[in-house]
Amino acid sequence: MIGNKSLMIFFAVVVALLMAFTPVAGLAHANKTYFSALECAYVLIPAQPEIRGMTMHITDQVHQTLIFSDDPLTFPNAINTAHLDITINMVTGQATVFAIAHVQPEGVEGTWEGFGTFQIDTLTGGQQGHAVMHGTGELAGQTLVLNTTSGNPAGCPMLPGFMSAGRWNGFIVHAEL
């Protein structure tokens, strides 16, 4: 008898948990729009590097990146102004970048504001990173989540100050109505 009660309590807890998480999972998938884009980075205001031992620190370097969307109707082209703090291990060539970003999509009365962290291999140009931004204005209540990887610089205009290319892949979580 005690075994049957334990089994019934176990199943009741499992059913309650499934019911609690099912609506959240459904909403999470229904309210996302996926996007991808090419990011072309340009040094706008170079910062003075400081070397301590075998580590180089670059504080508040300002980049401007041009974002070329793979589908501008889903995610408009944009200009991103980012303030970067960079730490480079001069032995390995590995760089860690912390960014505060301000993304202005074309034709939108609002911006994406947020931060990201990135790892860059300065010897090969390889990169990977993650960023989270929150919308303002028309984008208020929305969240942009993106991952970055190395991109093909051939798709970037070779303007003065060109630094690197990256790929943005991510999604937008839309505001609840």
Image: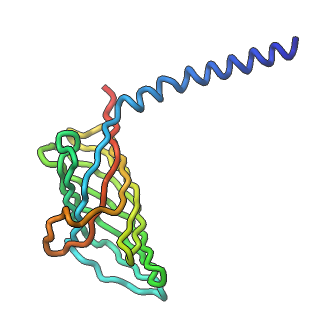
Quadrant placement of the C terminus: top left
- At a point 41% along the width and 86% down the height, the residue shown is 51
In this view, 40 is above or below 106: below
Residue 152: quarter of image: bottom left
User: How many marks can you see?
Assistant: 0
Residue 4: % across, % down:
82, 13
Left or right: 25 as drawn, with respect to 79? right
Is 138 or 129 nearer to us in this picture?
129
Quadrant placement of the N terminus: top right
Left or right: 72 as drawn, with respect to 93? left
Residue 31: quarter of image: top left
Q: Residue furthest toward the bottom?
A: 53
- At a point 75% along the width and 14% down the height, the residue shown is 8
Is 97 or 37 nearer to us in this picture?
37
- At a point 38% along the width and 84% down the height, the residue shown is 50
Residue 80: quarter of image: bottom left
- At a point 19% along the width and 54% down the height, the residue shown is 68
In this view, 110 is above or below 114: above
Is 131 or 159 nearer to us in this picture?
159
Is 176 or 168 nearer to us in this picture?
168
In this view, 107 is above or below 91: above
Residue 137: % across, % down:
21, 41
Q: Residue furthest toward the right?
A: 1
Left or right: 5 as drawn, with respect to 14? right
Q: Residue furthest toward the top?
A: 1
Q: How is the image coloured?
A: rainbow
Residue 112: % across, % down:
26, 49
